[in-house]
Image: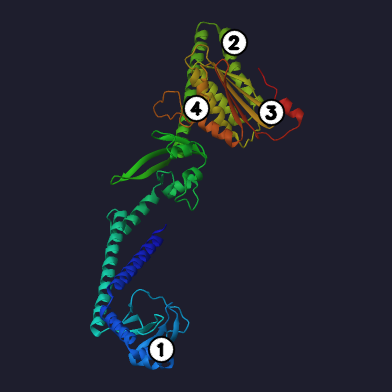
Amino acid sequence: MTMKKRLALIQASILVVVILTGVVWFHGSIRPDTTQYANAGRLAVKALAAGSSFAELSQHPQQLPSLMSSLGASGIALLNSNGVVIDGTGRFVPGELISTPSTANTTVQTRNAGGEVTVIAAAHVAGTKGHDSVIIDLHYRTSQSEAIAMTVRIFEALTVALLVGLLLSWGVGHWIRKQTFGLELDELKELIQEQEAMFHGIREGVIGLDDDGHFQFANSGAIDLLKLPQRYLGRPARVLIPDGRLQSAILGEVTGRDTIVVHNDRILVINRRHVEAHGTPLGYVVTINDRTESEALMRELDSMLGLTDALRAQAHDFSNRMHTVVGLIEMGATREAIEFATDLTLRDTQLMSRLTDEIANPIIVALLLAKSAVAAERNVEFQLGGAVLLPVELAYANDLVTVIGNLLDNAIEATQGLPNAWVAVRLLRNETELIVEVTDSGPGVRVDERDSIFVDGFTTKTIGKGLRRGLGLAMVRQLVERYHGHIEVSNDVGACFQVTLPGIFEPESREGALHDNSPEA
């Protein structure tokens, strides 16, 4: 319920309570003393019932109006023993049934309304055989003193109602002050304005959840990162955030600090913290830090470092070869020096020629050449088990670089330092699908970790200085899911990752597809 509706409801409730209090107090205070009027009515009806004149009048009912006028009554009637009006005038109608006690000789009923008192008195008529009764209806106006007393009581009722209203208003004010943590309205207004400016000026996303996981607030950064709808307040995060690691991290199902999540091409770092004020739990605050740009720079730096390592390895290898050639020439073994240099040149150009002829795409060729140089520098043999001709202009080249590069990096790191280490890559085609297979001679992947290795932030490697681990395979998984492909992990000699990416190739004839799909050993 909004504050406007809540205050309107409170004000209406206070008004109703004040009115009811005034009515009850007034109704209980304006009762005049009806004893004197009841006694007067009792004397009048007893005198009328005992007089022989009324017994005679009962035989002449036409004289009842004059008698009613002389008494100043509003009605007069003669009743039989059953309470039925035999003859009556004024407010009493012949044949009307009037309930009167049959045991008492005289009965009196009084009621007050405003400044008037009504007395209805009945008595048995003397000298009648059928126990007939006479009943009269008298009206008396209260005295001036009673009217003044009644006015005083009205003011008393209004005063009591006003005090009740003031007490309730004070209670509402105390409740509102408690809800605003003791801040006055002007202070609260200034605080909200300052916090709104600061809150939405933060680039990182900040959201607030209650204990049930419903949104309490979110700044502009969180709305943009999570793609929240316009009306998100009060709605459950489990409904507005898609299933996955992001939802689990925000709802606290994944615990820990700086939880890494890959979501919609964004690398997010999630932190969740329980908050309270003055001992009262308020829920949870979740911060969402977008690390996409910094991670892109880190990965670009890693690529540059890898390229530097490859160039350094090539320079080191070239220097060793030149030293060998120079040594052979100094020894006079000119023919051996020429054969050695020629063999090296042919061996260096063999892989480049094969990659260029069988893959063609310059971006993928350059990637594989760089990874082969890194593998050679780390004493890991690089093998090309099979290749498929890729278009020179390939729209998905950057995504393929991410998939192949991350798989090869993991394979090289898993095998370096092992005897007879090797990594192998195969690129195969199945109609419009591209199959990337990377195998190594490392220790393989444990069965219980085959699902965990694709979780954001999961790693089994030692985190080096300046490097962030646990994102490579998570990004591969996200790309595969975007292409609606799949990943298979198995253990052969070492680990074997097979990634299938549909829709990479345009549909071709059956003969062309078979020709491109012929692997080389």
Q: Position of residue 406 (x, y in %)?
A: 52, 28
157 above or below 466?
below
Identify the mark nearer the N-term, 3 or 1: 1
Relative side of 346 to 84, left or right: right
Say whether marks 3 and 1 touch (CB < 8 Å).
no
Q: Position of residue 42 (x, y in %)?
A: 30, 81
Residue corresponding to mark 4: 452
Relative side of 172 to 242, left or right: left
Q: Residues within 10 Å of mark 3 (few under 14, many from 20)?
A: some
Would you say residue 434 is visible in this rendering? yes
Which disc, if any, is residue 58?
Answer: 1
What's the amino acid at mark 2? Glu
Residue corresponding to mark 3: 430
What's the amino acid at mark 1? Ser
Residue 85 placement: quadrant: bottom left
Residue corresponding to mark 2: 339
Say whether marks 4 and 3 touch (CB < 8 Å).
no
